[in-house]
Image (cartoon, rainbow, N blue to C red):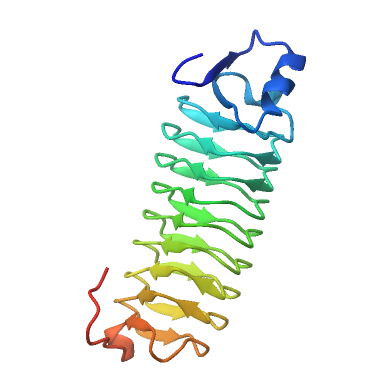
């Protein structure tokens, strides 16, 4: 055990591994574990310092902290608490339905085609941000996105996407602010007219709030 984490490697037997994984209070250091051995349902938090995080069968998880991984792959993951994969250039969660905060800061593309609800989403480096069925989120930070697809988004804490040329959010009803400073077209017909929107080329010049 280190820093309160339970260190696991491939010497652990499957019965013990399942027992640890079923404890929602546990933090499992799985740096040295073949992640293909994880149960499909993990209530514990997972921590890894490995260069790659590849959990081929994992469907449910507590927090996942894989901050050093340059690739993050969880092809069967459906639900997780917070996910931190800040150095992952490849970030693959094609079946994720719900999550807490998602920090995929370095991902070249952020695609979550089945994600419906999330906390904060940090896709800072992504040039493509694809969230086709997302309904509710915290903030969405897509600083370098040239493409942003969230046609069903209804509520977000705020949205930062200053490099977009076109911003279209037909279902968006509530957000603190939108920074789409390069947008030439801004379409969000259901937003309250008093919402802070910074999109000067599209005719939106908010008078008082700072641009974030």
Q: Nearer the viewer, residue 85 or 144?
A: 85
- Seen in the picture, residue 94 relative to 73 is either above or below; the reply is below
In the picture, which quadrant includes the C terminus? Answer: bottom left
Position of residue 161 in the picture relative to residue 7 (left or right): left
Where residue 175 sits in the image (x, y, percent)? 45, 75
The answer to which of 57 and 6 lies nearer the viewer is 6
Picture coordinates of residue 178 (x, y %)? 37, 75
Name the residue at 56% across, 30% down.
46
Toward the viewer: 108 or 115? 115
Q: How many marks?
A: 0
Quarter of the figure with residue 194: bottom left
Q: For the view shown, which residue lies furthest in the front direction?
A: 25
| Residue 61 percent location from the top left of the image | 64, 39
Residue depicted at 69% across the width and 36% down the height: 58
Q: Quadrant of residue 195?
A: bottom left
**Residue found 53% across the figure and 88% down from its top:** 190
- Using residue 121 as the reference point, say whether residue 179 is left or right of it: left
Q: Which residue reaches farthest right?
A: 15
Residue at position x 43%, y 35% in the image: 67
Residue 160 x, y percent position in the rendering: 36, 67
Residue 206 sits in quarter: bottom left
Q: Is residue 65 left or right of residue 96?
A: left
**164 up-or-down from 22: above or below:** below
Q: Is residue 140 left or right of residue 58?
A: left
């Amino acid at each position: 055990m280190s820093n309160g984490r339970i260190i696991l490697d491939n010497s652990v037997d499957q019965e013990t591994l399942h027992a640890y994984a079923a404890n929602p209070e546990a933090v499992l250091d799985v740096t040295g574990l073949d992640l293909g051995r994880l149960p499909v349902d993990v209530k514990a938090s997972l921590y890894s310092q490995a260069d790659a995080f590849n959990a081929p069968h994992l469907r449910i998880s507590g927090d996942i902290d894989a901050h050093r991984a340059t690739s993050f792959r969880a092809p069967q993951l459906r639900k997780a608490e917070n996910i931190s994969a800040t150095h992952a250039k490849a970030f693959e969660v094609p079946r994720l339905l719900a999550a807490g905060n998602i920090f995929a800061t370095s991902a070249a593309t952020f695609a979550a085609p089945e994600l419906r609800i999330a906390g904060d989403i940090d896709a800072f480096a992504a040039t493509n941000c694809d969230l086709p069925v997302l309904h509710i989120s915290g903030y969405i930070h897509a600083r370098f996105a040239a493409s942003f697809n969230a046609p069903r988004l209804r509520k977000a804490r705020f949205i930062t996407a200053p490099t977009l040329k076109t911003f279209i959010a037909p279902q968006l009803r509530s957000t603190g602010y939108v920074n789409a400073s390069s947008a030439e077209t801004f379409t969000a017909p259901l937003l309250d007219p008093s919402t802070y929107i910074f999109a000067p080329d599209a005719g939106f010049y908010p008078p008082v709030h700072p641009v974030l």
